[in-house]
Image (cartoon, grey):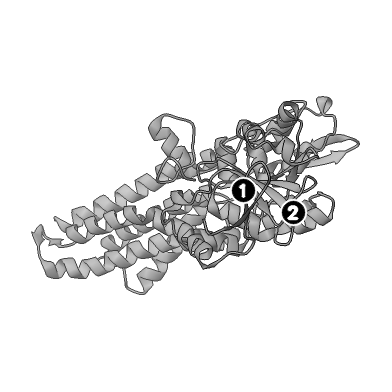
Amino acid sequence: MDYIVDYIGIDRKIPVVATFLNSYDRLVAIKARWAINRNDYKIPPGIYAVGNPDEKANVFVTANYKLSFDHLRSNIAGMNAWILVLDTKGINVWCAAGKGTFGTNELINRIRSCDIEKLVSHRKIIVPQLGAVGVSAHEVKNETGFKVIYGPVRAVDIPSFISANLRATESMRTVKFTLSDRLILTPVELVGHFKYIISLLVLMILLGGFKNSTFSFNDMFDSGIVVTVSLLCAYIGGAVITPLLLPWLPARSFAMKGLIVGVAISIVLYFAQLTGTNIIESISLMFIIVASTSFISMNFTGASTYTSLSGVKKEMKTAVPMQLIFFLTGLLTWIILRFI
Amino acid sequence: MITYIKNVVSLKLDVHICTGCNMCINVCPHNVFLLKEKRAYITNIDACMECGACQLNCPENAISVLSGVGCAAGIIQGYLKGTDPTCGCETDNCC
């Protein structure tokens, strides 16, 4: 726990945490973004101190995911404050709130078990706004007497929120989805779809060795290059290009955005003569590319900050059958070509 | 902000029982609500992502929304397991 720099308190020991992030913290952030041991970055729930807080100091609530905790502590540098860490099973505030672990009951129980009543003389607690998905402010007030004040969406706005007397402006309350927000999510998309694309790639490379029902390593090598290029482009198209181009792709549904990217990739590969020599084989590969890119792009709805359950259900109703038909038609045609 | 699919959102607000406490405006991440003459109104329904924060924080129970995760992988996972759509990552305890 190298983020703990000291302990304060008379009747109990409360850890004081650093407000600067060291190289280990930064390394963890990079690893988490690449989904490496992502479920293993938990902070022990409980109460922590920043600076030298007294009974008038603000209480900030956060999740016990290290990235959430690090965001908070690094953005309240120079303040004297308390941090109340809820047990969200190592999940960030918004996702945990959606699951209910960053929720009314956990907050009520944690306020009680950490004796916040004795720690501060006021009765206000600052909860990140995205936690409101799981926290009912009036219930917390009824049960504990603490008034929940929703802070800004982004921890970086906390200093301005504090100087504005705990008032969040409209821009502080609004979730955005900027190019850099989207870029930082692409590694997880790449890692998440890796095993599926690799399985498909291995299958197609092995089957690619067949020509007129006879296997040869030369054929496997030749067709392997074509297949690898096609699948890699589809994978990057869905996991990186669609997320980055999101606002500019002329469709609302993510599956359609992905379809546009898939068609564009297919056209480029076709004219670069990277889809094989046989026209039917080229078309079957294009079907596979378009279906894969569309499917991977559709899964980016989960990472986005603005898609509704009703909307995703609606787009899936037409997109999933389309993707399945494209994919199976493409793959079966491509396989049959090896054996006739 | 980018707009998602239109005319699908399940959000409803009963203006008559609204007391204008402002909580829905405070918690909405997409500025769906507006306060006019001490009552909240839905002004931008297509921006709603059905997160459910407004419903949970409305002391008068004036808001209803079928909230859930707008996540294709989660919907597929829920469909395969026969549960509600859940956050769809590789393991059960991540998001």
Q: Are marks 2 and 1 in contact (CB under 8 Å)?
A: no
Query: Which chain letter matches label 1?
Result: A
Mark in the foreground, 2 or 1: 2
| Residue A261 appearing in the image | no
- Of residues B38 and A148, the one nearer the viewer is A148
Task: Find numbered disc 2 in the image and state the secondary structure of the residue it sits on.
Answer: helix
Residue A89 located left or right of residue A117:
left
Name the residue furthest bottom.
Answer: A272
Task: Find numbered disc 1 in the image and state the secondary structure of the residue it sits on.
Answer: loop
| Residue A271 appearing in the image | yes
Where is residue A337 shown, x and y percent of the image? 19, 57
- Of residues A58 and A337, the one nearer the viewer is A58
Is disc 1 surrounded by few (<14), some (14 to 19) or many (20+) residues within 10 Å? many
Please give the label number shown on residue A306: 1
Q: Quadrant of the N terminus of chain B?
A: bottom right
Nearer-N-terminus badge (2/1): 2
Count of picture labels:
2
The residue lying at 21 percent from left, 54 percent from top is: A335
Q: Amino acid at mark 1?
A: Tyr
Please give the label number shown on residue A179: none
Where is residue B72 shown, x and y percent of the image? 48, 43
Q: Judge if badges 2 and 1 mark residues of a common chain.
A: yes
Please give the label number shown on residue A172: 2
Where is residue A77 shown, x and y percent of the image? 70, 61
Q: Amino acid at mark 2?
A: Met
Q: What is the distance, in whole Å, between disc 2 and disc 1 at their CAs?
A: 16 Å
Name the residue furthest left.
Answer: A214
Is disc 2 surrounded by few (<14), some (14 to 19) or many (20+) residues within 10 Å? many
- Quarter residue A107 falls in: top right
The residue lying at 58 percent from left, 39 percent from top is: A98
The residue lying at 82 percent from left, 25 percent from top is: B17
